[in-house]
Amino acid sequence: MKRVTFILVVCMLFVASVAVAAPYWLPRQYGTNDQQITTTKTIIYDGSIYYKGVTAGDRLDLRNGTTTGATAFYTFIAPAANGYENLPIIKKNWVANNGVYLDITRTAGIIGVSLDYSE
């Protein structure tokens, strides 16, 4: 009986620790228009870009700041009209000290980004 009680307590502690250690960020989607994503220091953990009906060459820039004039830290240029791409592994865990601004240049269709980040 003591062994069963011990195993039960260990299992309950494990479940509780996983629940407490769960990250507080969730993926958020942004797209089709220029927009401010954050205004403070931001860490981007993961992301993906989706596009449909765009013209090859349309682009999406993630900028370190609050305007279209801020420095771009990631630029995506659509290779075709439709698609989906993950952010490159080497580009994950970006730190944007001045916030994140989404700058989209497109002629048609939709283009957007899904980001996992924390502020």
Image: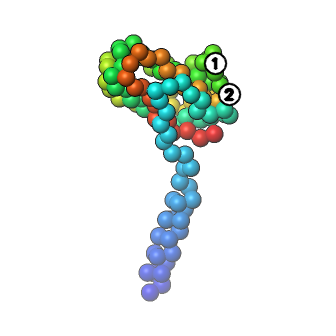
Horizontal and vertical percent position of residue 31? 47, 29
Tell me where residue 4 sits by quadrant. bottom left
Tell me where residue 89 sits by quadrant. top left
Q: Residue at x 55, y 46 (%)?
A: 25
Disc ID at residue 18:
none
Residue denoted by label 2:
98
Q: Residue at x 53, y 54 (%)?
A: 22
Q: Is residue 6 visible?
A: yes
Q: Quadrant of the C terminus?
A: top right
Location of residue 91 with respect to 29 vertically, above or below = above
**Amino acid tagged 1:** Ala
Mark 2 or 1, nearer chain start: 1
Horizontal and vertical percent position of residue 93? 55, 33
Residue denoted by label 1:
70
Q: Quadrant of the N terminus?
A: bottom left
Marks 2 and 1 sit apart, C-alpha to C-alpha, by 9 Å
